Amino acid sequence: GEADQAGDLSEVGPEILPRSARYWHGDLTSSESGSRWQDLFRSDTGKLPQGQLDPTAPAALLATSGTTAEPKFVTHSLLTLGYVLEAYDSLSAPDDPHPVALGGTPLSHMSGFILTLIALWYQRRLLLTPKLEPQACMALIEAERCTMFIGAPFMFIGILEAQRTRPRDLSSLRFCLAVGDVLRPELVREFKDVFGVDLVTVWGMRSEEHTS
């Protein structure tokens, strides 16, 4: 997470998230908060956990947005994350010999986090954009020949609008996921008509993911 938010985790006990497993981006005011994420590149892999891991033990903490209640951390285990990957399998994404995924949501969001897991598990190249806006994403899709894109519905609306004013070659796209909000049927139809790609919606709280 961001270093200026390290204090928010001060009440989370080490039995849930050990200090040695906390990595932060930015300048830390105290070493007791954890380590800088850059330290991961210098870590001795021999210190990594060895042997059988407990599939029910906490593996990730994701914060809710607080739109329906007070923000809180949702605990995921290896087991629940495995269920999410199984749900992705059920989407039957098209096979591609050279898959390239582009994330149109922050990695701190459930959707961005899951896209990272998908890229790691299925050994897919994952691209990130510093600007979460339609034109920037379209430029990357065209330049890098991305085959998969994930974003909120407003991103797909923006891509359609941008295509009318500055058309780009997005023919490499094979699979698109809309997350984080209601996906209107007319948007699905229009996106299919313009780009020839089906929009699949993924919805749910950060504590679980659903597909439809």
Image (cartoon, rainbow, N blue to C red):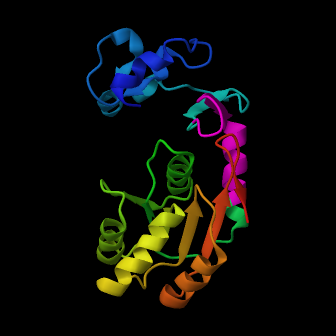
Residue 194, image x, y percentages: 49, 88
Residues 46 and 57: in front is 57
Residue at 56 percent of width and 33 percent of height? 63
Residue 119, image x, y percentages: 50, 56
- Relative vertical location of residue 32 with respect to residue 130 in this rendering, above or below: above
Determine the residue located farthest toward the bottom in the rendered image.
193
Q: Is residue 169 visible?
A: no
Q: In which quarter of the image is residue 86?
A: bottom right
| Position of residue 1 in the picture relative to residue 90 (left or right) | left
- Relative vertical location of residue 14 with respect to residue 45 in this rendering, above or below: above
Q: Is residue 120 highlighted in magenta?
A: no
Residue at 61 percent of width and 28 percent of height? 70
| Position of residue 62 in the picture relative to residue 19 (left or right) | right
Determine the residue located farthest toward the front in the rendered image.
68
Q: Is residue 65 visible?
A: yes
Residue at 66 percent of width and 77 percent of height? 185
Q: What stretch is highlighted in magenta?
A: 66-87
Total labels: the figure holds 0
- Relative vertical location of residue 145 with respect to residue 44 in this rendering, above or below: below
Q: Is residue 71 highlighted in magenta?
A: yes
Split into 4 quadrants, where in the image is the N terminus?
top left
Residues 113 and 79: in front is 113
- Relative vertical location of residue 48 with respect to residue 188 in this rendering, above or below: above
Split into 4 quadrants, where in the image is the C terminus?
bottom right
Residue 208, image x, y percentages: 71, 45
Residue 148, image x, y percentages: 49, 70
Residue at 45 percent of width and 66 percent of height? 155
Q: Quadrant of residue 190?
A: bottom right
